[in-house]
Amino acid sequence: MKMNIPITKTIFGDEEKEAMVKPLETGWVVQGPNVAKFQKMFSEFTGAKFAHATTSCTTALHLGLEAMGITRGDKVIVPSFTYVASANAVEYTGAEVVFCDIDLRTFNIDETKLEDLIKNDTSIKAIMPVNLFGLCSNMPYIMNLAKKYDLKVIEDSACGFDGWIGDNHSGTFADVGCFSFHPRKSICTGEGGMLITNDDKIANKVSQLKDHGASKSDLQRHKEKGGSLLPDFTMRGYNYRMTDMQGALGVCQMDKKEYIMNGRREVAVKYDEALKDISQLVTPYIPENYKHGYQSYVCIFTDGEDISNLTKEQIDRLNIKRNIFMEKLEEMTIATRQGTHAVHTLGYYKNKNNFKDEDFLMSYAADRLSIALPLYAGMSDEEFDYVITNIKEALK
């Protein structure tokens, strides 16, 4: 009998339903007390001094780049294997994206390629490592390199919730870290994002930028005498404010973060064990002293071939087999996805820069050979066994 297995599930319950109603009853539906509480909880969990809720991770990245002073004429290094939003946020500032290839083991930026890019181009002002699928990039190395060349660093931690290196949470290494609460992420507010930083100046600037450039928020005005007067607007800003209904969802999700994350990790451990003898799939790699957040469980499809010296021809041949494998699982109503895309292969960036697919070969390989398997807290043994049984059948 077929079972319907989604790629992931949001963990919502009666708590979220009740929390969503309260802003409607109080009338405070814009950025307000729930957002403030969500920010405080997120700050305390990650260990960051400041946390600012936004409409999305994309807008958080935009705010962070602007607050750090990135502007037209500057360049920002971004891994080529990431969601397109990473690169788009750089373009919003007028700056230019410089792509860097990835390490296929981690799916993260290949830090060994960074210094050659930096030392040959004085226009590069920042690095945007992406902590993809929940695994931190090599942030200690990247931060040392940034210090050497006086560069800013912004962590795209859209997938990075509860990802760690030692005792340091994803997003806290850099000048700025940015998170997503989209339904594909571990905790969800529908849409929504969060920017964290330990820098007072950046935090103050982000607070104004996300609120049209206002010197005071609506909540501050509400609590202070003289709140009937509009504040001063000392900079050009944006409307990137999270609603208080989303903030209420965020508070509930933070309250159940242990259940959500423990559940995701339990399923990941089961995958590691169940797939260890399947030569056609390479399971996620975790460096020593790293803790994976498992926003996704992403494998590389090799069909049992040696991929240590990949060529475009081998990638294209294996890609056909990967797609057939994914189609077979889809026929059994098991949802899978490619990990994400190689941005240099997407029409806008490819045409703008005349890129060839093989210009960033490991990113191209990750695009064509990655496969995300279903992963969510509360996945039953029956659901898991159904997935594994059909993976084995599809690979025959």
Image (tube, rainbow, N blue to C red):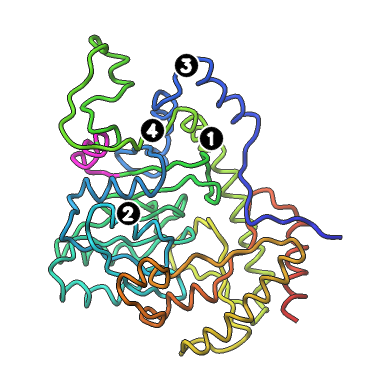
User: Which quadrant: the C terminus?
Assistant: bottom right
Which residue is label 4 attached to?
Answer: 40
Would you say 65 lies left or right of 14 here? left
Q: Image point 29% across, 39% down: which residue? A: 49
Q: Earlier in the sequence, mark 2 or mark 4?
A: 4
Mark number for residue 255?
Answer: 1
Secondary structure beneath dot 4 equals helix
- Say which element carries label 2: helix
Alpha carbon separation for disc pair 3 and 1: 24 Å
Give amino acid for label 2. Ala
Residue drawn at x 17%, y 24% is 232
Quadrant of the rendered image containing residue 334: bottom right
Quarter of the image for the N terminus: give it: bottom right
**Height in image: 121 above or below 378?**
below
Disc number for residue 89:
2
Q: In the image, what residue type sits under mark 4?
A: Lys
- Assign a secondary structure to mark 1: helix
